[in-house]
Amino acid sequence: MFTDTSISERELAMNTSWLVETHGDPLGVIQLLIKDAWERFELDTMMLSMNGSTKPRLINDPEQLYKVNPFKPLMTKNAAKYLPQVLEDIPDSRVGVVLRPCEMRALVEKTKREALPMDRVLTICFDCLGTYPLEDYQWRAERKGSPERLAWESLHFARQGGIAAYRYRSACQACRTPIGQGADVNIGVIGLPVRQKILVNTRDSETANTLGREESISEEDQSLIDQRDYIIARLLQRGSNTRQRLAENLESILPRDLDALLHLFERCGECRECFDNCPLCAADYPARDELGLYAREDVMQWMISCAGCGMCEQACPNHLPLVTIFSQIRQQLIESIDPASQIH
Ligand code: SF4
Ligand code: SF4
Ligand code: SF4
């Protein structure tokens, strides 16, 4: 059930996964790793959304990477929405992009619909330790003394799988998987003793070699990976339980199917906040007819490809539980296409 997020024997045999010593400073080692990737892959710029800023920003000087902290527990925008424009604005550049798992999922879905020049993009995806709603984040950061301290609190509990999920955004509580995967370079911290070691996993052995892969996994490393897999399995089960619980709690008010969702959008009128903040939507997608009604087929595809990032819910002026609504409808649609699939 969890094989897509654990390190398979095949990956180990292909030497695309290895553990990196952190000597008590995981963040410092991660910043060096990103800087090293910048140099080895000859990047011109790097896009980051996960640094506590209110929207993704570009870094043009690798020396500034010491400011990067992928574990700040705040997400206000999904970087996948902005990458196409960045690629258009700076043609012929090699661009690195640091992503959370839900941003990576959105980017994968986007590339199915849009022809993006991914050959000049290096994707780096991190395990995600969860994010707070903005006000909560600001309040907590103030209480801790700085956003950095708050981020360190998350990292401190990485080995146990992060801190209590009920404080996070509902998207994070119900996250399908917070594991960094599917990118050119994936960095793992969940389930690991981050003051000692973190995990690096690459798309293929060529990427691993360019990155200067370290030597093979020792027996001790293997037991850390087994422990990580165990924690990941527990996290995924918790996410699944949360999705079911949220759906049950809201059952009487949720749109029950795609048609009910289309009716909901009809009632929303000209509000397009969820569309405008979704990395998968565009001005002409989902399409609308002359009466302002959304095309059923487009909304269906949108739901199926939903990355579960929660940017829609965060933007909804009516505070609708869109993560739960979309997740239920996505599940229904996928099961109707393939009755054997169980994606709770
Ligand atoms: S939805 Fe998942 S991947 Fe995205 S910010 Fe929340 S925990 Fe992280
Ligand atoms: S519909 Fe919402 S949760 Fe899904 S990808 Fe778009 S913004 Fe994220
Ligand atoms: S953001 Fe909320 S109110 Fe606006 S269209 Fe989406 S669901 Fe409707």
Image (spheres, rainbow, N blue to C red):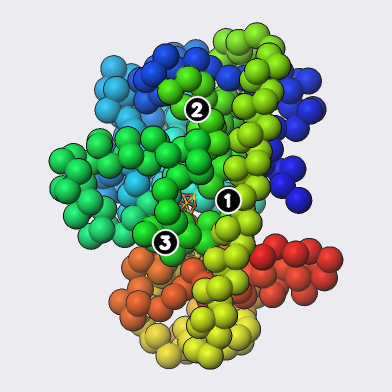
Residue visible at 32% across and 24% down in the picture: 65
Between 174 and 305, the residue placed more toward the observer is 174
- Amino acid carrying label 2: it is Pro
Does 257 sit above or below residue 132?
below
Label 1 CA crowd tier, 10 Å (few <14, some 14–19, many 20+): many
Residue 49 left/right relative to 112: left
- Amino acid carrying label 1: it is Leu
Residue 261 x/y as whole percent: 54, 83
- Judged from the image, the secondary structure of the residue bearing numbered disc 1 is helix
Q: Can the viewer see residue 188?
A: yes
- Using the numbered discs, state the Cα–Cα distance from disc 2 to disc 3 in whole angstroms: 23 Å
Residue 298 x/y as whole percent: 60, 71
Does 219 sit above or below residue 331?
above
- Amino acid carrying label 3: it is Tyr
Residue that numbered label 2 is attached to: 193
- Going from the N terminus, do you reach mark 2 or mark 3 first? 3
Residue visible at 74% across and 43% down in the picture: 3
- Using the numbered discs, state the Cα–Cα distance from disc 3 to disc 1 in whole angstroms: 13 Å
- Judged from the image, the secondary structure of the residue bearing numbered disc 2 is loop
Residue that numbered label 1 is attached to: 235
Residue that numbered label 3 is attached to: 166
